[in-house]
Amino acid sequence: LVNRATGDLANGRMRIMVRTNEGELHVDPFELSFDPRSRSHQISQTNGPSTAAQVIRIVYMLENGILVDENEIQPNPEPFIIVHESEVECPSVVFVYLNDDSKDPYSVVKMSTHFYCGVPSQCVVSKKFTSQRNPAQYCSNIALKLNAKLANSANRAKAWQTSFKMDRGLEENITWVNEVATMVLGLRCSHGIGQDSISIVCMSAILDPSCMHIAQEMKVQMKSEMIGAPILRDCVKALAIQFYKYTNTSPKRILFYRDGLSEGNTKRVMDHEVSCIRKALYDFLSEENPNFECPNNCMKRGC
């Protein structure tokens, strides 16, 4: 800290000066929280309930115990301890608290965390929480999303199951998925405005039987409802490789979900895309095993 008047240097810790029913006191910033229901700050207590408090100002406590107001020091004080970037551990997830569900703040959060930093984020909307009849249900939904976002190939965490117990000890599964190695694919194409715009092709693949872990591919092409054959084959092949790396086996079945088609083009697009998927898997299996031969004798077209 640098004294604004004298220029003297000193070390100090930031504190928050608050007013409670017992008078004014200074607390550690990490002991202070905001309660959206009462619209007031609370001081956390190790033993006992929290205490309501009104924030007054920021102060700094020097090493000799003297309190200094924020306006008595020069702005932007330097940190007392500075560590190298290599010693800072990247967070697993970033929590962001929003006042309401406006689109712009949400978009900024997702762009900043996902695109620039590559870190999952979870938004919690104060207005949604306070309007819930059952706040515990809202918290449960947040926890479910977090479990899904924090799951990866290392911890193999699961937020849900695709199998469940029935009466008399029987187990019910989603048809197909648990019988053999099944790769579930989802495809959607988003189109820009105007004839000379672009189309963004997004494809996802489920890597595990619980339908928790997902690999994704994205391609860009000139605007068209029909996805170019090379683009579609590249997406399927890349996802098949990810499936093989995750499961250590090749997909034996494909469950394909397609969205965004008009009724008049469904049959034509389906024939085209299924053909591309078959050819991509044939190429993938051929590269995995040079001696691979299709048992249906499809002449390398995929079947």
Image (cartoon, grey):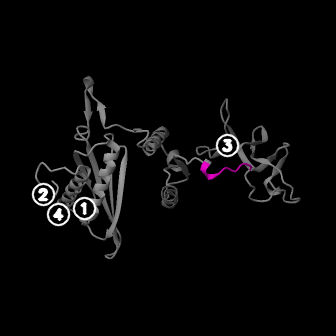
Choose mark 1 or mark 2, whichever is in front. Answer: 2
Question: Does the segment drawn in magenta span residue 84?
Answer: yes
Q: Name the residue that disc number 3 marks.
A: 30
Classified by dominant secondary structure, the portion drawn in magenta counts as loop
Q: Name the residue that disc number 2 marks.
A: 299
Neighbour tally class for label 2: few under 14, some 14-19, many 20 plus, Cα within 10 Å = few
Give the residue type at disc 3: Phe
Label 2 or label 3, whichever comes before in sequence order: 3
Q: CA distance from mark 2 to mark 3?
A: 68 Å
Q: CA distance from mark 3 to mark 4?
A: 60 Å
Label 1 or label 4, whichever comes before in sequence order: 1
Q: Name the residue that disc number 1 marks.
A: 261
Instruction: Pick out the residue farthest to the top.
Output: 168
Q: Residue at x 87, y 55 (%)?
A: 8
The answer to whether residue 212 shows anywhere in this view is: yes
Q: Disc 4 on helix, strand or loop?
A: helix
Percent coordinates x, y for residue 228 in the rendering: 25, 66
Give the residue type at disc 1: Leu
Label 1 or label 3, whichever comes before in sequence order: 3
Q: CA distance from mark 1 to mark 2?
A: 30 Å
Residue 30 sits in quarter: top right
Q: Name the residue that disc number 4 marks.
A: 268
Neighbour tally class for label 4: few under 14, some 14-19, many 20 plus, Cα within 10 Å = few
Residue stretch rendered in magenta on the structure:
80-86
Left or right of residue 93, residue 203 in this image: left
Label 4 or label 2, whichever comes before in sequence order: 4
